[in-house]
Image (tube, helix red, strand yellow):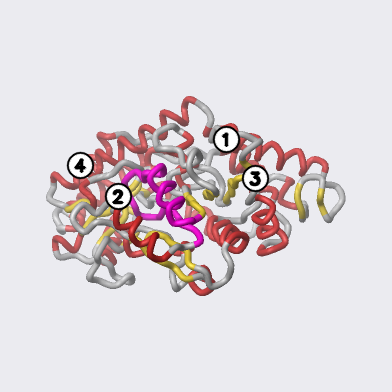
Amino acid sequence: MDKEVRKLIREETQRRDDSINLIASENYASKDVREALGSVFLDKYAEGYPAERYYAGNGVIDALEKLAIQRARKLFSVSSGEWDVNVQPYSGSPANLAVLHALIPRGEKIMAMSLAMGGHLTHGHKASVTGKIWEQVPYGVDRLREEIDYGELLHIALVARPKCIIAGGSAYARKIDFKRMRTIADEAGSILFVDMSHFAGLVAGKMYPSPFPYADVVTTTTHKTLRGPRAAMIFSKKNYSPAINKAVFPGIQGGPHMNQVAAIAVALHEAGTPAFRKYASRVIENAKALANELERLGWRIVSNGTDTHLFLVDVAHRGISGGVASRELEKAGIILNKNMIPFDARTPGDPSGIRIGTPAMTTRGMGMREMRYIAGYIHAILLKKNVAETKKMIKILAKKFPIAR
């Protein structure tokens, strides 16, 4: 291998081994997933869909794509008679763009959680192409409870009459009431589009409500809590799937990355095992334990806790910015991201909060006891107490839970 790249691979491996990774959107894929990602499928062009390719030599490719689709339906308990699955999106952002491109006329209104309240960039934020093509009608959370106010959401939807309502986000820690979202969408005459990218693994593990009984379209990335490759899938009701498939290819993508599809198939198989269900349960247990311990140490947890794999901490409550907190923790070996909190008075570049997630460290085998240790380390670093000793303890703890090779 190229010596310079090999050196960087070694450096990144060392950084991962020595760090405690609390980034909510990251995880560690299995050896089998990585093997599929680096397989011979990397080399094949397969523009089109099974039995409708533009290149020859795709018989095996067709079988692979059908297998991934079959496993996706099985994992999330959806029928082939009602739901189609597209496993070709390169990532979550193009998957969301494809859905909107297929179903929502240019310039129409789409309703989604505000990025500042926990939503996602690709749900119509002005910095995203989705916000330039469509008009976002934002909804948020109640100021007191910091949870979705469904009454206010209904009011906004009835006034705006958006073409679709998007449920899901990147920094919302509570369960979403999909049944209520369905009712609101029906009253407003809107399509219900669920982006379950963050909590898909929790749905697969039966630890989070499934959106499928209520949604018209569901997108998800396949990494994060699902612990697969960096890729995405689109589930859609049969009446929407022809337009969505055309939007993916040839609309916004060329040939699918079939090595990604192979890795998706492996990850879906792994996510259907009893071991994965236990993993999903531990992810949430760990998030609750970490949030509870930080709260005990005097840190304000947004929405007073979590139902999922992530939560937000209001560090400005103790006179620290999110940017400073993230940088200081990284220096100590704890990796997370700065994040806006609801009704944030600070800027996105240096917000009031940090986002913490437990999928990666749960994969490495940590449990609730380790989460309490980590809370203590975060507390010590941010308040500059015994920093040198705490850094040593962080590295020792990380080394005790190596990443599977």
Find the residue positioned furthest to the top.
274
Residue type at mark 1? Val
- Report the mark closest to the observer, 4 or 1: 1
| Residue pictured at 15% horizontal, 53% vertical | 386
The reply, left or right, for residue 72 in relation to residue 253 is left
Look at the numbered disc 1 and give the secondary structure of its residue: loop
- Report the mark closest to the observer, 4 or 3: 3
Label 1 close to label 3 by CB (< 8 Å): no
Say above or below: 322 vs 180. Answer: below
Look at the numbered disc 2 and give the secondary structure of its residue: strand
> Dot 1: within a 10 Å radius of its alpha carbon, few (fewer than 14), some, or many (20 or more) residues?
some
In the picture, the disc for residue 208 is none
Compare marks 1 and 2 and give the one earlier in the sequence.
1
Q: CA distance from mark 4 to mark 1?
A: 35 Å
Disc 4 designates what residue? Answer: 292
Label 2 close to label 4 by CB (< 8 Å): no
Disc 2 designates what residue? Answer: 311
In the picture, the disc for residue 78 is 1
Residue type at mark 4? Asn
The reply, left or right, for residue 318 in relation to residue 131 is left
Disc 3 designates what residue? Answer: 238
The reply, left or right, for residue 72 in relation to residue 12 is right
Q: CA distance from mark 4 to mark 3?
A: 43 Å
Q: CA distance from mark 2 to mark 4?
A: 11 Å
Residue numbers of the magenta segment: 163-190
